[in-house]
Image: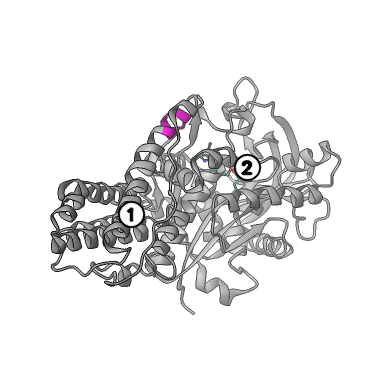
Amino acid sequence: MPKDTFYLTTPLYYTQGDPHIGHGYTSIAADVLARFHRVTGDGKVHFLTGTDEHAQKIADAATAIGKTPKQFVDDMLERWKAQWQALDISYDQIIRTTDADHKAAVQSIFARLRESGDIASGKYEGWYCRNDETFWVESKLIDGRCPNPECRRPVEWVSEDAWFFKQSRYRDRLIEHFRANPDWVRPQSAYNEMMAILEGGLEDLCVSRSAVSWGIPIPDEPGSTIYVWFDAICNYITAAGYPHDLARFEHLWPANVHLIGKEIARFHTIIWPAILMALGLPLPHLVFANGWITMGGIKMSKSLGNIVSAAELIERYSVDGVRYLLLSQATYGTDFSISDEQMVRRYNADLANDLGNLVQRTLSMLARYRDGKVPSPSRTSELARGFESARDGASTSLHALDFRGALGWIWGRVAELNLHVERTKPWELAKRGDDRALDDVLYELCEGVRWISALAYPFIPTTSEAIWRALAQDGLPGKFWERELQWAKLAAGTQTNVPPALFPRIEVQDAVS
Ligand code: MSP
């Protein structure tokens, strides 16, 4: 069976603490992409997300409150699910690294690589950061501490017999793959950084821990567990059925895109493809590393104490408001900061005024002048071409994960329709009794709003559905683009209604800093 499904993934989130909007950002981006592919009909979509539950810091957090690690991760999962639900994340599958199927699959992958000699025994001596679950060479430490600026905790000296993944075997093939596929890691800065690491040489990776009991046991070696990153990174294939359900696996693999944060690019673009090469499996088509949401110039992170929760933001800007504001703020792949002042300003301008008022005034005028019934146009609209370009532009942007670019195309049409109202002044046409011209303008506005609802659906699904229903349309907004996004598809005579305000204005005196 050939691959027939657009398969996309988020990182597996660590569940030692509550999620914040930094985690939500990657999930929102993945969700927009999943919804886009569902409504454009490029085949089936499989959207995988999940939780990374074997980290030592999770076991430590559980012990600290007197729970077993398993009880703890079961409880935490509910909080993560609540965030995904609040942000309208339409995943198809959640994988937990504590799932029995995943554990069995990772053990079988480990055993297989040990048989092929890609995992071999050796002695590990070196520095280990428990918080980051990362081994560091001495030269990288800063004042004897973990060099990750978010962590800087003391590292531990570890000395033990261990298993090593011989990733150095794959260095040349990795470099070849990077050269032959210059777009496979995005953005360019991540590609360059990873290429520089590869060119600098690769050390083998220690993939076992004898002192850690919370993890997947190494086959035939009681007492040792598999390094948590090896365990977690394999999720992308174990969730897809490897190696126990190859029929399912063939529909999904290789993944079309792994969405990740930039701090974990090395795991996804060097270690992970080396593991896949060792297993004789094809590599994912694309790994896209997003930038960080920063607060006061530094990464939003629990350990830095500068987090904002999704719930707080949703309460203020609504879920679609949050999705829009985050993805339109910066080009995907770059860092950006958020502040209430700037978010309120953009919410009021782009959502309350430009989109919200456009829909409101269009449907209110239709109610006032035509009892809410879509009139029949007398001519082809000059607006059609601009909408077709926006559809194609948004589609090209979304295929390239340029979310901001896609929103630029869509909001360009919102601006165009608002301008059209100002230019044509339907209220004057009504006063003059110029019915034919009024019918034409009202039709153009309704049809334009229908297109905007469809185009914006991946970003603001709840709002888009409200608009779509106000226009008495069935199904998902714009499913499928090719069929629905033809100008003048809106049937004359359709009975519309005026929806409640889509994005109520936030009064500036309510703004908090
Ligand atoms: N468990 C590992 C990933 C294993 S994948 C096989 C991990 N988890 S994490 O919870 O620490 O981070 C997961 C992801 O959350 C990051 O890669 C990133 O995508 C996202 N973000 C966390 N904080 C963020 C910001 N402040 N800004 C943007 N994204 C952030 O690493």
Give residue 19's mark.
2
Give above or below for 242 relative to 442: below
Q: Outermost residue, top direction?
A: 143
Please indicate whether residue 290 sits to the left or right of residue 425 in the image: right
Q: How is the image coloured?
A: one colour
| Residue ID at (50%, 53%) | 170
| Magenta stretch contains residue 338 | yes
Where residue 86 appears, x then y in whole percent?
Answer: 58, 50
- Specify start and end residues of the magenta stretch as a single range: 337-344
| Residue ID at (32%, 53%) | 397
Where residue 259 appears, x then y in whole percent?
Answer: 49, 51
Give residue 364's mark.
1
What's the amino acid at mark 1?
Ser
Front in this rendered view, residue 38 or 167: 38
Would you call the spot at circle 1 few (<14 residues within 10 Å), some (14-19), or many (20 or more)?
some
Front in this rendered view, residue 353 or 360: 360
Front in this rendered view, residue 360 or 218: 360
Instruction: Look at the image and tell me whether residue 173 can be seen.
Output: no
Provide the secondary structure element on which disc 1 rests. Answer: helix
Instruction: Look at the image and tell me whether residue 140 can be seen.
Output: yes
Q: Earlier in the sequence, mark 1 or mark 2?
A: 2
| Magenta stretch contains residue 97 | no
Label the magenta part by its dominant secondary structure. Answer: helix
What's the amino acid at mark 2?
Pro
Provide the secondary structure element on which disc 2 rests. Answer: loop
